Structure formats: C-alpha cells, structure tokens
Image (spheres, rainbow, N blue to C red):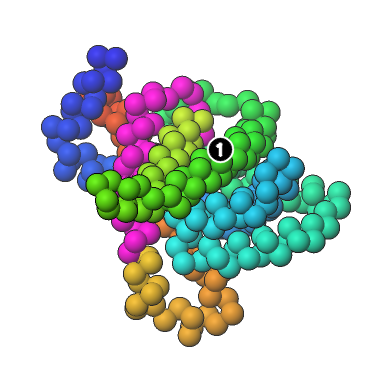
Amino acid sequence: MPILDTRIRHVLQHPGRFILTTLREFRANQGLLLAGAVAYYALLSIVPLLILMLIGLSHVIDPARLLDTLARYLEWLLPGQSRALVAELARFMEHPALGWVLLVTMIFFSSLAFTVLENAMSVIFIHRVAIRRRHFLVSAILPYCYILVLSVGLLVVTLVAGGLQTIGERHLEVLGHDWSLDRLSGTLLYLLGLAGEILLLTSIYLVMPVGRLSVRHALVGAVFACVLWEVSRHVLVWYFATLSQVGRVYGSLTTAIVVLLSLEIAATLLLFGAQVIAAVERSGADPAPQGFHT
C-alpha cells in the first residue's frame, strides 16, 4: 500500500509529464495499430456474442425486454447505430434457426475479440509478460468465462432498468403539485449505465493483463477511459448528426463503417487506459522498458 500511495502521489505531482510519457509509450507500443486489430475483431464478434447472450437469457426473461436494454446501452458503444443492430438481432430472434454448425461458428467468432484484446494487453503490459506468462488453457477459457459474466450482467441490468422505468411512469404529489418521476428515472438509468461501464472496464483491466493487478490501479484506468469515452461518444453523435457525409461516400456500407469507426475509438481509449495503468505501475520505479518500434 505505501508503494501504491507513492506512485499515485508521484503522478499527481507531475500530471503533465505523466500524460506526455504515457502518450509516448502508447505510440511506441503501436497503440493505434493494436486498437485497429481489436476494433476489427470486435466487429466480427459483436453480433454472434449478442445472439448467444439473447438465446441463453431468453429462457429466463422476455426477449423484448432484453432487446430494449440492448438498444439503450448499445447506444453508448455505437452512437447512432444501435437501432440497426438491434433490428437485426430482433429479426434473428423471430426465427432462430440454430444448427450445430452455426452454433459452433458463433461461439468461435464471439470469442475472437477477447483473444485479440488479451494479446494487445500483453504488449502494453510487456513488463509483466516478460516475467510471467499465462497458461494457454487459461487464455483459451477466459473469453467464454467473460461471455458468461457479460450475460449475467445483461440480465441484472435488464431487471434493474425495468424497475427504474416503472418508477419513471409514476407521479409524486407534494403540496398539491404533481411531480413526474420520469426525469429521476432517466438520471438513474444513466448512472446505472455509467456504473456498469466503469465496472466492465475495471474487470477487463483486472482480468486481461497477466498477473495480479491492483484494484485501485484498475479503477483509475477505468475512470480515465470512461471519462474520455463519454466525451468522445457525445462528439460522435454531434458529428454524425451535423457534419458527417459518410452516407454519401459509403452508401449501403455506412452502418458498417460507422460501427467500425466507433469501435476503433472505443478500443483506442480502452488500450490507452491500460497504458495509463502500466505507466502508474512504473512511475517512481525503474525506467520503463522500451516499446516496440517499426
């Protein structure tokens, strides 16, 4: 704990120097190239992953409620494109012709993003990998454990969001004035999504890198990445609504291009948050190892 406090104090004393050093390390580790790989495989994985989650959870909860929750919170990940994706999911759920070949294919593709993300994390946390490597069986099982955890998280969020929406339909009468609870419900739904986002990022930073990571370090990286993404997604919504001409350029490919761009930015911020954690771990300690150069 004293070492942790010393490192955080060292970062807070020199924030500008810390950010510049982190940016240089991220560039040396080819962060944008890694983010591109993560985004590409995330694009391949997102639909099979969501289908598997919907098929599994539809046995315990109404699929319409699940799709409603996905539509709300996928907007956080894919600004302006969640409706198109949810519409495709709903169309599949209406006629779920699921054979063994298709099931195995979806299970395989749904895990690709986690595998690539783990490899990208190993580059950023190279000082950990050089000391300790993860057993290949753990790396093989980890993506499917994460899919299971995400399914449970989606179930919990759906149930909680349903309760909050019920609260929003009620009215409170105080001193003869009728007050709607819709705004309170909306605020609580937003805070629920924000808390879920921070919790998800923290779990990624705790599980994906090799070795044991401090919860406080993981939380610092998660909050940092979450704040940057909140700013970025609002900028993306404004850009696509006002300035973007992507529809004229790409035509029918617009949805895929916009989704890939959103995933690219999200993956960049996710990996940069990991780079922040790695920099905090090395701050005030021995000099950082050199990154990869081309």
Using the image as rendered, state which of residue 112 and residue 288 is in the foreground.
112
The residue sitting at 66% across, 65% down in the picture is 88
Where residue 247 appears, x then y in whole percent? 49, 81
- Using residue 97 as the reference point, say whether residue 251 is left or right of it: left
The residue sitting at 38% across, 31% down in the picture is 218
User: Which image quarter is the N terminus in?
Assistant: top left
**Vertically, is 266 above or below 260?**
above
State whether residue 187 appears in this view: no
Whether the magenta-drawn stretch holds residue 232 is answered as yes
State whether residue 80 appears in this view: yes
Using the image as rendered, state which of residue 84 and residue 181 is in the foreground.
181
**Vertically, is 5 above or below 260?**
above
Q: Which segment is the magenta one?
A: 208-235
The residue sitting at 60% across, 61% down in the picture is 86
- Using residue 146 as the reference point, say whether residue 22 is left or right of it: left
Where residue 140 appears, x then y in whole percent? 67, 34
Where residue 16 appears, x then y in whole percent? 16, 43
Q: Which residue is mark 1?
A: 156
Using the image as rendered, state which of residue 39 and residue 251 is in the foreground.
251
Q: Amino acid at mark 1?
A: Val
Element type at marker 1? Answer: helix
Whether the magenta-drawn stretch holds residue 24 is answered as no
- Using residue 239 as the reference point, say whether residue 285 is left or right of it: left
For the residue carrying disc 1, how many other residues have a C-alpha within 10 Å: few (<14), some (14-19), or many (20+)?
few
Where residue 166 appears, x then y in whole percent? 49, 47
